[in-house]
Image (cartoon, rainbow, N blue to C red):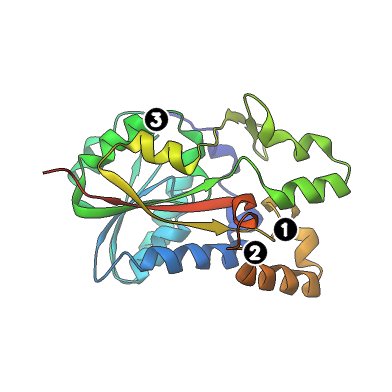
Amino acid sequence: MTPSAFDGVAAGYDDRFSHQEIAKFLRAKVHRVAAQSLLGPSRVLEVGCGTGVDARRFAANGHAVMATDPSPAMLEITAHKAAGTRGGAIETAVWDASTPMPMAVQNGGPYDMVFSNFGAMNCVRDLSHFGQQIAQVMGGEGVVVLVLMNRWCGMELLLNLLLRNTTNMLRRLKRAPVATLEDGSRLPIWFPSVRAVRKALGPDFTVRTRVPIGVFLPPSELYGSFQKRPRLLRLAKGLDGTLGAVWPLSRLADHTLIALRYCPAT
């Protein structure tokens, strides 16, 4: 299998991110929205599954999951978790969503939901090609749930301004942004708007809802400073629930969840 930039960070990913209190809080919000589109046992195609936290939650709720990721190391962890999961089955397949869909993923369809969490799709430049591929494996009127990083993140700008860290404060605003992983690996990222996503996926996909994910909570590299201050964390969670959906604050979240309905023209 071809190595991935994420192979080098797979081993410690859960400790650095998935197991953090803020990440759990945000993930729970994502799943509450996603669950509204899954009425009864369904088939889910996850794109960029990482270490399989979301795949395991879907499976525990009785859904069958095809968990894909470009990182073989991430998928090894996912497969290990799948072995101890009750409920729906979890299959894994190496797939970089910028490349043609593997036959194993095609044969696993049709899918009721295509799901991608916490910015995995920001690594995909050509969303139109992605849309063409998933349209071929979706069943009936399926749904696509994408959680994308925003170009404008209010808390990232504010906190890094206070810390006088101009590099992190402005990193999303560069003409050609590059993400630097914990092991020093670098990869280009993109920040498509909701309108650009809908246009790229094509006329068969209609936006049903958009939900801000993490308006008053910090980006992941600053989780620690908030989690050491319980009162601050409680305040941030409370504000996220009460004011996070209010415009224009809702446009300054760390991520935005976009749910689209697939309804092919007849």
Q: CA distance from mark 1 to mark 3?
A: 30 Å
Q: Residue at horizontal 61%, vertical 71%? A: 241
Q: Which residue is mark 3?
A: 98
Quadrant of residue 102 in the image? Answer: top left
Q: Earlier in the sequence, mark 1 or mark 3?
A: 3
Identity, as a three-letter code, of the amino acid under mark 1:
Tyr
* Nearer-the-camera pick, 225 or 173: 173
Identity, as a three-letter code, of the amino acid under mark 3:
Ser
Q: Earlier in the sequence, mark 1 or mark 2?
A: 2
Q: Residue at horizontal 26%, vertical 70%? A: 39
Identity, as a three-letter code, of the amino acid under mark 2:
Ile
Give the vertical position of 219 relative to 63 (above or below).
above
Secondary structure state at the residue bearing disc 3: loop
Quadrant of residue 227 in the image? Answer: bottom right
Secondary structure state at the residue bearing disc 2: helix
* Nearer-the-camera pick, 266 or 175: 266
Secondary structure state at the residue bearing disc 1: helix
Q: Which residue is mark 1?
A: 223
Which of the numbered marks, if any, corresponds to residue 22?
2
Pinpoint residue 91: horizontal percent, then vertical percent.
30, 53
Marks 3/2 in contact by CB < 8 Å: the verdict is no
Placement of the N terminus among the 4 image quadrants: top left
